């Protein structure tokens, strides 16, 4: 099972709790955790690496790429965009990922999510009850259905085939990096509602 996180120092402590709950629920499963980092201090790296004492559990640190777009960080950090640029960072042989926000507590084994048949879909996500105000900020109709990108299962082959990263870059460039909650808003606008 391949798990993806993206974090900076501000969320590293919270992420360590998420990772601890994930590893505890997957003692018998092979888990590869990829962490896209944006300035995580050595202190937190040691804490997180200290959680890995099972030979079936692996951790891979990946630096946040340079993005040649002025991104608005309305929630504090460029790390929030890491999930949108995973394709250029993760080894090519990884074809399926579960992305988890740093504040996600894992209460059950994720095997059922991992084997979910996405059919023709690129991502599996949950609907979210965002306000009409947020929909208006994104330029969407009131009846638009929105989703939460905090937990996603991603089919990388479909992601590449549909050129999702290119579409996200085009959108962010067009909007000059100004999309409300860009890490959430950009995929909503790219995938449609």
Image (cartoon, rainbow, N blue to C red):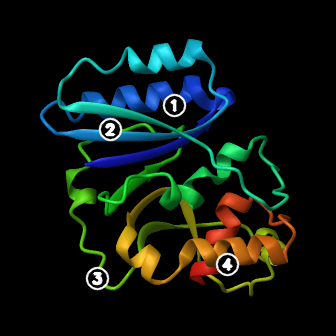
Q: Is 93 drawn above or below residue 56 in the view shown?
A: below
Give the alpha-carbon distance from disc 1 to disc 4, as whole Å. Answer: 27 Å
Alpha carbon of mark 1 to alpha carbon of mark 3: how far?
30 Å
Q: Quickly name the residue at label 1.
A: 15
Front position among marks 2 and 3: 3
Horizontal relation, residue 102 to residue 119: left or right: right
List the residue tagged with mark 3. Answer: 119
25 relative to 106 in the view: left or right: left
The answer to whether the residue labelled 1 contacts the one labelled 3, judged by CB atoms less than 8 Å apart, is no
Instruction: Kindly identify which numbered label has been placed on residue 53.
Output: none
Label 2 sits on residue: 107
The residue lying furthest to the left in this view is 28
| Pointer 4 residue | 189
Lower sequence index among marks 2 and 4: 2
Q: Nearer the viewer, residue 98 or 130?
A: 98
Which residue is nearer to you in this view: 53 or 139? 53
Find out whether the residues at labels 2 and 4 contact each other: C-beta distance under 8 Å.
no
Residue located at (58% from left, 60% from top): 84
In the structure shown, which secondary structural element does the residue marked by tag 4 occupy? Answer: helix
């Amino acid at each position: 099972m391949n798990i993806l996180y993206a974090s900076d120092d501000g969320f590293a402590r919270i992420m360590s709790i998420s990772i601890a709950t994930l590893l505890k629920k997957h003692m018998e499963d092979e888990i590869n955790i990829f962490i896209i980092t944006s300035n995580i201090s050595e202190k937190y790296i040691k804490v997180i690496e200290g959680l890995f004492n099972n030979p079936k559990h692996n951790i891979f640190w990946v630096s946040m790429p340079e993005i040649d777009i002025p991104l608005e960080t309305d929630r504090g950090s460029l790390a929030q965009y890491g999930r949108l640029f995973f394709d250029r960072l993760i080894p090519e042989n990884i074809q399926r990922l579960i992305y988890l926000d740093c504040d996600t507590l894992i209460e059950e084994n994720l095997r059922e999510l991992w084997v979910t048949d996405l059919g023709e879909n690129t991502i599996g996500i949950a609907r979210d009850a965002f306000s009409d105000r947020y929909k208006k900020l994104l330029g969407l109709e009131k009846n638009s259905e929105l989703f939460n990108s905090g937990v996603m299962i991603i089919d990388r082959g479909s992601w590449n085939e549909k050129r999702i990263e290119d579409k996200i870059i085009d959108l962010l460039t067009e909007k000059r990096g100004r999309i409300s909650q860009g890490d959430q808003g950009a995929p909503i606008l790219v995938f449609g509602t």
